[in-house]
Image (tube, rainbow, N blue to C red):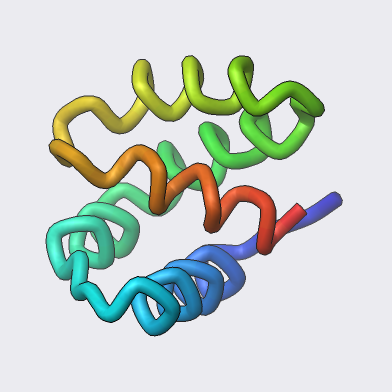
Amino acid sequence: MSITISDLITALNKVEHIHKIQVENVHLFFKTNEAIVLNAFKEIISRDSIDERFMIIDKEFSALGDVKTYLLEASYLVS
């Protein structure tokens, strides 16, 4: 499956709306590191296991702080 940064931002917006949060640092990271983010999410969505997805998110996005569960949710919205 081919995903775009727009797909990821749309999914992240849905997660933000559901949880009534804002994660501007993630939006900024996505926009400034588009190639890295797309490659990471291609790997993430290729995994069926929640644990495997979470481990990749933890490795690739550790600098973003405590947003891993939101990124996990977004990964299911784009897959």
Give me the residue at 16% from left, 69% from top. Answer: 24
Could you tell me which residue is drawn at 43 percent across and 48 percent down?
A: 71
Question: In this figure, what is the number of numbered marks?
Answer: 0
Task: Residue at the far front: name it.
Answer: 19
Q: Quadrant of residue 31?
A: bottom left
User: Which of 61/53 is in front?
Assistant: 53
The residue furthest right is: 1
The image quadrant of residue 19 is bottom left
Q: Is residue 6 left or right of residue 2?
A: left
Residue 34 screen position, x and y as percent: 40, 53
Q: Is the residue 66 above or below the residue 54 in the image?
A: below
Q: Name the residue at 62% across, 16% down.
A: 52
Q: Quadrant of residue 27?
A: bottom left
Residue 61 x/y as whole percent: 30, 32
Instruction: Please say if 19 is above or below 31.
Output: below
Q: Is residue 70 rendered to the left or right of residue 40?
A: left
Q: Answer with left or right where residue 1 lies relative to residue 23.
A: right
Residue 39 location in percent, x, y?
56, 36
Please state if 65 lies on the left or on the right of 9 as rendered.
left
Q: Position of residue 40 (x, y in %)?
A: 52, 33
Residue name at image x 24 percent, y 57 percent: 26
In the picture shown, does residue 9 fall above or below 64?
Answer: below
- Note whether 55 is above or below 38 in the view shown: above
Q: Nearer the viewer, residue 15 or 30?
A: 15
